[in-house]
Image (cartoon, grey):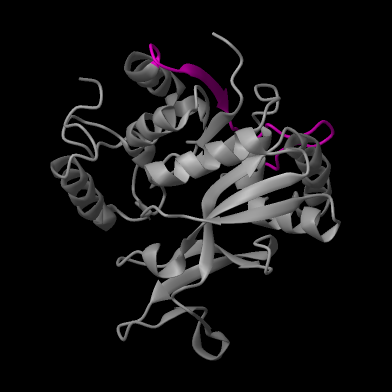
Amino acid sequence: MSLPQASLLILAAGMGSRYGGLKQMDAFGPNGETIIDYSIYDALRAGFKKFVFVIRKSFETEFRERMDATWGDQADLHYVCQELDQLPEGFNCPEGRTKPWGTGHAVWVAHDLLDEPFGVINADDYYGREALESLYQFLIQNPDPDFYYAVIAYYLKNTLSDHGAVNRGVCWHDEEGFLKKVIETKGIQKSTTGEIFAGKDDELQYFDPETLVSMNMWGFGASYFNFASDRLKTFLESHLSVKDAEFYIPELIQTLMDECLIKVQVIPSPSNWFGVTYQEDKPFVQLAFKKMIQEGYYPDNLKA
């Protein structure tokens, strides 16, 4: 197989604590299809051929067998495990830590498998075919992939759950469409009157429904790994013993932009986004796929 021009990194190591199980392995389509299956189907049509999955050892065998059997004849598949003790040299995971080190760390663990421009998506989020096409075209047309990155942005109002609070990377961009600021904001939810807010009591923060947010769909160059390695070490020096501390992609990107090491193009998504944060979200997602199949957007069986 010839070397790909761009690859897709799929973050599938989540613990699904709020969902109550491994949502990256859960069935949402009529023939047991996972959200990952629809993402791979769309990504192949967008032009991606190489896929790298970040998973965990606890379900590695089952995950590998399923993906290889489903997509191994159409795609170049690779796997890497994200574990708590997988840290830069000189650092050891504190005893008793159970929480993963965050999305920035999840991408970093794939450093031995990628030396080409690559996109990043979550395994348990649906991004839409048009968004993946936009991402792929950006990656293969990028004149300087080590300096120009991209984020596919969605409207906040289209990314909320009706069943609880969510975390979102809130984006601001300049007149040329380059990202100026991205802030990981926790606990965003919709009130009974339709207002969108985060926080509690006298610390409430309200948001415009049209606010652009990152749904963790990025376009990076291989330079990401050197940047992340350096910043991860800095993060661990001050946060290693903080039980719930996480190394987030948006915070890393902000640091790199502030230091003028990268510029990030904001690409508004023409696609609908949906995901499963809570078990109550599952019927909505299943219905959404059923509707797209009825409309002919997807075949009834992706492998038929």
> Residue 195, how many percent across, how many down?
39, 83
Quarter of the image where one finds residue 224: top right
Query: Within the magenta stretch, is there residue 166?
Result: no
Query: Within the magenta stretch, is there residue 88?
Result: yes
On screen, residue 136 versus residue 244, left or right, reads left
Residue 133 visible in image: yes
- What residue sits 20% from the left and 20% below the top? 304
Of residues 7 and 205, the one nearer the viewer is 7
> Residue 199, how many percent across, how many down?
52, 79
- What residue sits 29% from the left and 37% below the top? 26
On screen, residue 57 versus residue 143, left or right, reads left
Q: Is residue 48 above or below residue 164?
A: above
| Quadrant where the image shows the N terminus | top right
Residue 244 visible in image: no
Q: Main secondary structure of the magenta part?
A: loop
In the image, the segment drawn in magenta is 72-96
Of residues 141 and 115, the one nearer the viewer is 141
